[in-house]
Image (cartoon, rainbow, N blue to C red):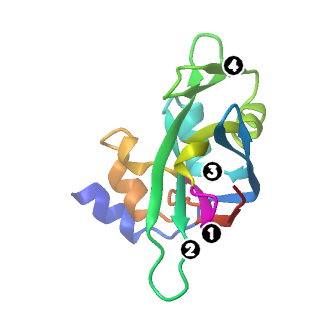
């Protein structure tokens, strides 16, 4: 408790990180709607130092499809999430990105290369074509965020109190064209 109090009283000198979705689109491949996006990760110094020290960071990529209506709220048709882990492999001193849904892994020589690759989301299947009624209007959205709950327990209180750990892109939305 004393550590949490001391950290909350310390000046906030660490630069805040950010996640920005620059572009995203959807298309149909093999009767499935897939999403591709370009995301810029500017991890805070605290997050980069934690990663270099061996702490794995979990990135949540949330997708949603909402049916657009004129006078009522837009009901959600689909909500799903994809999770990625980025971590430093201690023995090889390389950075590994793991898709926690498929188990696919990418190995990179530097943290910069790993972060660049993490920002290239390619053809993630989100819905079958028959699930979307072509006569209705839909909005599709993507949000990318750092999952603070997945951090090691001793680091969580610091992450909750420090703005340098709260990183989320907010929702990037566009019209889905069936």
Q: Is residue 175 left or right of residue 14?
A: right
Q: Position of residue 45 (x, y in %)?
A: 63, 51
| Alpha carbons under labels 1 and 2: distance apart | 5 Å
| Alpha carbons under labels 4 and 1: distance apart | 40 Å
| Alpha carbons under labels 4 and 2: distance apart | 41 Å
**Does the CB distance between marks 1 and 2 fall below 8 Å?**
yes
| Alpha carbons under labels 1 and 3: distance apart | 42 Å
Q: Secondary structure at mark 3?
A: helix
Q: Position of residue 102 (x, y in %)?
A: 53, 23
Give the foreground label among 3 and 2. Answer: 2
Q: Is residue 75 above or below residue 57?
A: below
Q: Is residue 121 above or below residue 37?
A: above
4 or 1: tag closer to the N-terminus:
4
Q: Quadrant of residue 123?
A: top right
Q: Position of residue 39 (x, y in %)?
A: 72, 51
Residue 107 - label? 4
How many numbered dots are placed on residues in this image?
4
Pointer 2: residues within 10 angstroms few (<14), some, or many (20+)? some
Taking the spot 76% from the left edge, 21% from the top edge, the residue there is: 109
Residue that carries the numbered disc 3 in the rendered image: 45
Q: Is residue 29 left or right of residue 98?
A: right
Which residues, given as a range, are shown in magenta? 133-144
Residue that carries the numbered disc 1 in the rendered image: 137
Q: Which of the pair 45/85 is nearer the observer?
A: 85
Q: Which of the pair 26/87 is nearer the observer?
A: 26
Q: State whether residue 121 appears in this view.
A: no
Residue that carries the numbered disc 2 in the rendered image: 68
Q: Which of the pair 74/54 is nearer the observer?
A: 74
């Amino acid at each position: 408790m004393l550590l949490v109090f001391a950290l909350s009283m310390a000046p906030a000198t660490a630069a805040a990180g950010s996640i920005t979705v620059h572009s995203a689109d959807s298309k149909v491949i093999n009767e499935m709607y897939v999403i591709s996006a370009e995301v810029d990760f500017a991890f805070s110094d605290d997050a980069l130092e934690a990663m270099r020290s061996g702490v794995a960071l979990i990135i949540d990529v949330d997708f949603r499809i909402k049916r657009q209506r004129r006078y009522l709220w837009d009901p959600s048709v689909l909500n799903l999430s994809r999770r990625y882990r980025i971590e430093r492999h201690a023995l090889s001193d390389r950075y590994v990105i793991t898709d926690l849904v498929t188990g696919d892994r990418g190995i990179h020589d530097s943290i910069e290369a790993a972060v660049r690759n993490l920002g290239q989301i390619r053809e993630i299947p989100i819905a079958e074509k028959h699930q979307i009624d072509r006569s209705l209007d839909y909005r599709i959205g993507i949000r990318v965020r750092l999952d603070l709950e997945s951090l090691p327990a001793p680091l969580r209180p610091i992450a909750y109190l420090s703005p340098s750990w709260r990183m989320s892109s907010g929702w990037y939305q566009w019209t889905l064209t069936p």
